[in-house]
Amino acid sequence: MLSHAINQCNHPAKIKTTNNTKNKKALKQKAATKHMNERHTSALHHYHVRKRIHKKHEEYPHPDPWKRIMDRAIYPIGALGPLLTIPQLLTVWIHKDTSGLSLVTWVSWVVIAFFWLAYGITHREWPIIMTYIGWIAVELGVVIGILLY
């Protein structure tokens, strides 16, 4: 009867045991949640790697000679692509010759270039931004020429 009375009253020993049980359950639940979060964030690995790279850029100019060469060469190389398309643009506009040119192909190139430009702006990558501004200008010139002639 005494043990029954202790179970029904708010005996300090009974309260402590109840709190310990609740704490153990809370700790187990917290550990399970942490494990779930770790699994979930591992799927976002690429995002976190990109975020870390974005927040801490490498030195510029880079101490590694190969990267330093690439850093210097990317701007002229990026400008070279659109410049090499200028003969096609001149053929369309000066000679008014659009035979063999596909409107679908050139419009597709413009759409793709806009996505690349948006990517470059989003990540603040100047080589990508400058290259695709050039590509969009040249490709739109060809597209407009195809539509007119």
Image: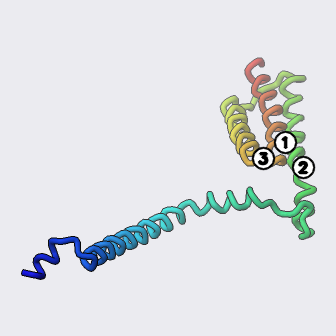
Three-letter code, disc 3: Arg
- State whether residue 6 is above or below residue 73: below
Colour logic = rainbow
Q: Earlier in the sequence, mark 2 or mark 3?
A: 2
The answer to whether marks 1 and 2 mark residues whose Cβ atoms lie closer than 8 Å is: yes
Q: Residue at x 71, y 40 (%)?
A: 118
Residue at (77% x, 23% y) in the render? 144
Q: Mark 2 points at which residue?
A: 75
Residue 59 figure quarter: bottom right
Query: Where is residue 21 shown, x and y percent of the image?
Result: 30, 75
Task: Sort mark 3 into few (<14), some (14-19) or many (20+) by Cα contacts within 10 Å.
Answer: few
Mark 2: secondary structure: helix
Q: Are marks 2 and 3 in contact (CB under 8 Å)?
A: no
Work out which quarter of the rendered image holds the N terminus and state it: bottom left
Q: Which amino acid does label 2 sit on?
A: Tyr
Left of 55 or right of it: where is 73?
right
Residue 130 has which mark? 1
Q: What element carries label 1?
A: helix
Q: Which of 111 and 120 is in front in this view?
A: 120
Q: Where is residue 37 in the image (x, y as percent from the top left)?
A: 48, 64
Q: In this view, does 138 lie to the left or right of 53?
A: right
Alpha carbons under labels 2 and 3: distance apart: 15 Å
Which mark is on residue 124? 3
Residue 131 vertical placement versus 20 (above, below): above
